[in-house]
Image (spheres, helix red, strand yellow):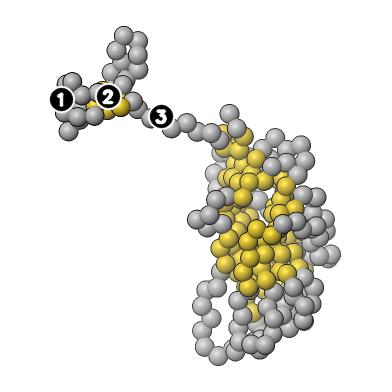
Amino acid sequence: MPDIDTTATSGVEARGYRRGAASTDGWDQYVIPVEDKIISYRGRVCTFVTPGRAAVSQKIFAIHNATGSTVLVDVNRIMVDLLSTVAKAVTVLQPIVRLHRFTVVPTNGTAQTKGTLDTAFTSSASVTVWGDSSADNAGAGTSSATTLTVTTGTAIDQVYAPRVISAAGYEMVDTVSFMLGDPDIVLRALEGVVVFLDMAVVTTGNPATDRWLVTCDWTEYTRP
């Protein structure tokens, strides 16, 4: 087995690993990983139960990093879940669940509460999270007084919402996970990501009897 040099010689740091067993074999230097992020917060937010808004294309969650922010934000994962309390015909067009980038800070809706994954960290006030419901209301959800408003930009991921075609049988877990295993979405100052229920063009596609949940994980950091 090749030797491992763990000592310093003549003021030079340890050389690393010998390429072979012989004393005449050369050395490979240690490769020391360098952390390129100084992490200041690891966060998670869970929205309130959010009722559908019928024929209205609906924004149900947004995370935004304000202008002038001193932190960068990596959005690690966004999970969307739907509970349908009314069956929908196979001919009914479901909304498309899309992720969009945006810039201008959201308006209306309801500010959500950040949850920390490490209590030693504190979130930047520049990072805000929003939903379109103000309370769980015993699982029924309470829609925000005015719908969450975001001027959407480029779509960066999408999937059709799941559907209950009949009320008979068992509903399997149908959570949609965005960014799982993909590169993180980086939010610089004045950038955000919104979950958009797009093209809900008929009232039966996203009725008020639908119940939506969104969970989002993110990391706040600076560069050394």
The mark lying in front, picked from 3 and 2, is: 2
Callout 2 environment at 10 Å: few (<14), some (14 to 19), or many (20+)?
some
Instruction: Give the structural element (helix, strand or loop) at label 3.
Output: loop
Mark 3 or mark 1: name the one nearer the start of the chain: 1
3D distance between C-alphas at marks 3 and 1: 25 Å
Residue 95 picture quarter: bottom right
Q: Tell me which numbered mark, 1 or 2, is placed earlier along the sequence.
A: 1
Label at residue 22: 1
List the residue tagged with mark 3.
32
- The answer to whether one can see residue 135 in this image is no
Q: Earlier in the sequence, mark 3 or mark 2?
A: 2
Q: Residue at x 56, y 57 (%)?
A: 179
Residue type marked 1: Ala
What's the distance in space between the residues labelled 3 and 2, CA to CA?
15 Å
Q: Residue 94 location, x and y as percent?
A: 68, 78
User: What is the crowding at mark 3: few (fewer than 14 residues within 10 Å), some, or many (at least 20)?
Assistant: few
Q: Amino acid at mark 2?
A: Trp
Whole-percent x, y for residue 157 in the image: 63, 61
Left or right, residue 154 beside residue 180: right
Q: Up-down: is 63 above or below 60? A: above
Q: Residue furthest left?
A: 22
Crowding at mark 1 (Cα within 10 Å: few <14, some 14-19, many 20+): few
Closer mark to the observer between disc 3 and disc 1: 1
**1 or 87: nearer the viewer:** 1
> Is disc 2 placed on a helix, strand or loop?
strand
Q: Which residue is mark 2?
A: 27
